[in-house]
Image (cartoon, rainbow, N blue to C red):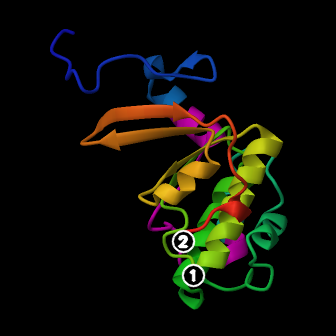
Amino acid sequence: LGGMDTLSAGRVFLDGREVSAFNKRQLADYRRRDIGFVFQFYNLIPNLTALENVEIASQIVKDPLPAAQVLRDVGLGERMANFPAQLSGGEQQRVAIARALAKRPQLLLCDEPTGALDYNTGKQILALLQAQSRKNGMTVVIITHNSALTAMADRVIHIKNGTVESMQLNENPASVESIEW
């Protein structure tokens, strides 16, 4: 391995491309175009409205979803003109989700996407993520401690101490509406 850390050695393929061989510019372009991120701490721009925060992401890709429509899809049709400081934590989280979805990414990485949401809104967001995955062929990766969500997944990967402990395929993923936690 030529001195490489064995925990980070190897090759990474996404959508048939070896992204681990990309240079910095190629990686930046790939992340900009093909990957959406929903961070646990939202990373919204405070001096932009909810609509403007979503439009920012829309401006960096060729065929974005309309920002206003995605905000309506996450239940924020009436809050588009509000700034992040005027939104609750759950509303801010939904703006972050809308921003990521607007890019139409091939891969959407979500860190505890329902963490700041009440039960019903959390189910609404999970249903939206599941629908987007099915409708647009988007791969959605949800990192969560909520094991009840595994029923909706196509594949469940358990990680312990930074190592894959197990992986299971779910032949019959449940609808979000049928999941209780």
Q: Secondary structure at mark 2?
A: loop
Residue appearing at x 48%, y 61% in the figure: 112
**What range of the chain is rendered magenta?**
28-52
Q: CA distance from mark 2 to mark 1?
A: 8 Å
Whether residues under marks 2 and 1 lie with C-beta atoms below 8 angstroms apart, the answer is yes
Residue at numbered disc 1:
84
**Residue 172 picture location, percent across and down:** 70, 40
**Residue 74 picture location, percent across and down:** 73, 70
Decide which of tag 2 and tag 1 comes sooner along the chain. Answer: 2
**Residue 4 picture location, percent across and down:** 20, 18
Quadrant of the image containing the C terminus: bottom right
Q: How many tags in the picture?
A: 2
Q: Is residue 37 visible?
A: no
Left or right: where does residue 105 sit relative to residue 5? Answer: right
User: Residue 97's image quarter?
Assistant: bottom right
Picture layout, residue 135 above or below residue 7? below
Residue appearing at x 64%, y 55% in the figure: 100
Q: Secondary structure at mark 1?
A: helix
Residue count near mark 2 (Cα–Cα under 10 Å), binned few <14, some 14–19, many ≥20: some
Tell us which disc is closer to us: 2 or 1: 1
**Residue 78 picture location, percent across and down:** 79, 85
Residue appearing at x 53%, y 27% in the figure: 26
Quadrant of the image containing the N terminus: top left
Residue at numbered disc 2:
45
Picture layout, residue 109 above or below residue 168? below
Left or right: where does residue 141 sit relative to residue 4? Answer: right
Residue appearing at x 41%, y 58% in the figure: 145
Q: Is residue 17 visible?
A: yes
